[in-house]
Amino acid sequence: MKKFLGIIIGVFFLVVIAGCQAKTSATVTFADEEITQTEITFSVEINDPDEEITGLITVNLLKPDGTIAKTDQIDDQDEEIVDFSFYSLENEVTYTVEVKATVGRDAIVIGTVEYTTLTASIIHITTPEQFLNMNTNRSGNYVLDNDLDFTDVAFASPFTSSFSGVFDGQGYTISNVTFSSITTYTGIFGYVSSGTIKNLNIENVTIGTAAEPLLILTSSRVGILAGYVSSSTASIENISITDSEINYSSASIVQAYVGAVAGEFRANLVGLTVDNVSITVTSTSYGRIKIGGAIGLLQEDGRLKEATVNADIHFIMAGSNLKNRDIQVNIGGVIGDHNARNNYKSVENIASLSDIVVDLDFGTTNDTTFGNYAVYVGGIAGIAMSNVVNGFYGGSITLNHEKNDNEEDVVKSFFVGGLFGFYASNKALLQIVRFGNGQTMDINISDDVTLKASQTLGDKASTAVHVIGIYGDTSLNVNLVSMVGSDTSTIYTELTDYFTSDWILDAFDAVDLPG
């Protein structure tokens, strides 16, 4: 009997205690989830309409058995949204996020959510649908097991947010991809952060057509492989891009960066072939333009090595009512703006065969009182802030500009070089040559343009002693008049022992040499 009474009393006290525990109308909203194989990132928003929370708010990450794996807290309760990241987690495990708030003297759970980390196992891609489904695991380890043909398949890059996984193409080909629009990051892989993409052939990709170029009104980074490769830890290896085209018109007042590989690139790229790729960009505004046969903007930590680039580049400046604006255009057969200054020999073994045509009509209005229009065009890079070692250029360059009487108060400076439009580094350019076998440099401009032009460097701000020159046919025509006689570029009659790498020797032997 006493035992029975004890049980009744115990149950009574439990009920009383439960009934006395605090309750609250406070809740939590979870958002902005980012899940990888070993990391969970999310944000929380605390909703406390009756201002009942009196103390600490704790965020616990619970294992499947209910034990705490990680814990954090919200220090400033006045913050509306707080971001959390939990690292070093196990793969393919379902974790519970538990948010506890102090109400009175009690810690009450005001919200939970479950997240499952992604698999680290190899994921095999065999169909276009599986490729597009990679957006569900942006840090996955992918292997392509066969060619992928996207004919009649609506394409949108799986990675509008960053790809940080591995994609091994195993030498197979992705082909017949058609883009229906330009976005902020346009490319098959869209936006790549710390990922690896290797051993992949890309063929017959269409980003707009000559008859129907795509239009974008905001800033954009456009490349056939990726629009933006954002991290120096990313690696791109052994990539071939052939028989493809980019045609678009930009009205952006910010930027338009374009290249066959990427619009903007901060990573490591070794082993590239670009062949029979056309890039046509029309700008109607004053945004910064950077166009390269491979890369529009190569950033400080970028590297580019062993690249053969044969692209037809056509830039059209068709300004619309521009008044009192500064314009900068960088166009290169390989790199529009080479800014990879943080690494020694960041660019080496470069074979450029791209043809470049630039047509300039700035559309300056008659009430313009100032402006600075700077145009940089080069067979390897439009402008370079770091050097290149072992390279050659064997294409043609044409630049056309007609006088606009509204530009009397505008400073127009054009820099055109067979190798670099403008070079601004004290690192020496080594073993680089422009060769001619019928290729030409033709510049047609008005008399109010300040022109700096050469078959090698259009202009430079460099004290280094460079090893560069011309081999084969010479050509530098300004308004139909040859300027070869006044060009001080070194002319080589033979190149025995000139280049210093087997790769560049093989690449040079493969082209149509003079004679």
Image (tube, rainbow, N blue to C red):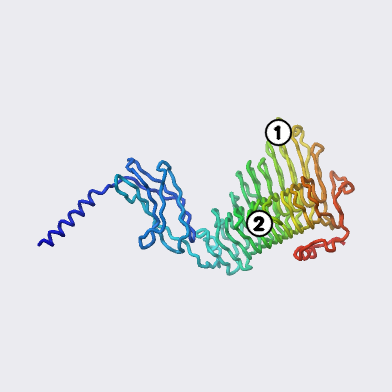
- Residue extending farthest to the bottom is 145
Residue that mark 2 sits on? 261
> Mark 2 against mark 1, which lies toward the viewer?
2
Front in this rendered view, residue 19 or 138:
19
Place residue 169 in its image quadrant.
bottom right
Say which element carries label 1: loop
Residue type marked 1 = Thr
Q: Is residue 211 visible?
A: no
Q: In which quadrant is the C terminus drawn?
A: bottom right
Residue type marked 2 = Val
From the viewer's perspective, is residue 425 above or below residue 351?
above
Residue that mark 1 sits on? 365
Please give left or right for residue 397 compared with residue 73 in the image. right
Residue at the image point whose x is 60% and y is 54% from the top = 231
Give residue 503's position: percent from left, percent from top. 75, 64
- Residue extending farthest to the left is 1
Please give left or right for residue 479 compared with residue 287 in the image. right
Please give left or right for residue 311 compared with residue 122 in the image. right
Give residue 34's position: percent from left, percent from top. 48, 54
* Comes first in the chain, label 2 or label 1: 2
Say which element carries label 2: loop
- Residue extending farthest to the right is 485
- The 10 Å Cα crowd at callout 1, few under 14, some 14 to 19, many 20 or more, is some
Front in this rendered view, residue 70 or 380:
70
Q: CA distance from mark 2 to mark 1?
A: 36 Å
Callout 2–callout 1 Cβ contact below 8 Å: no
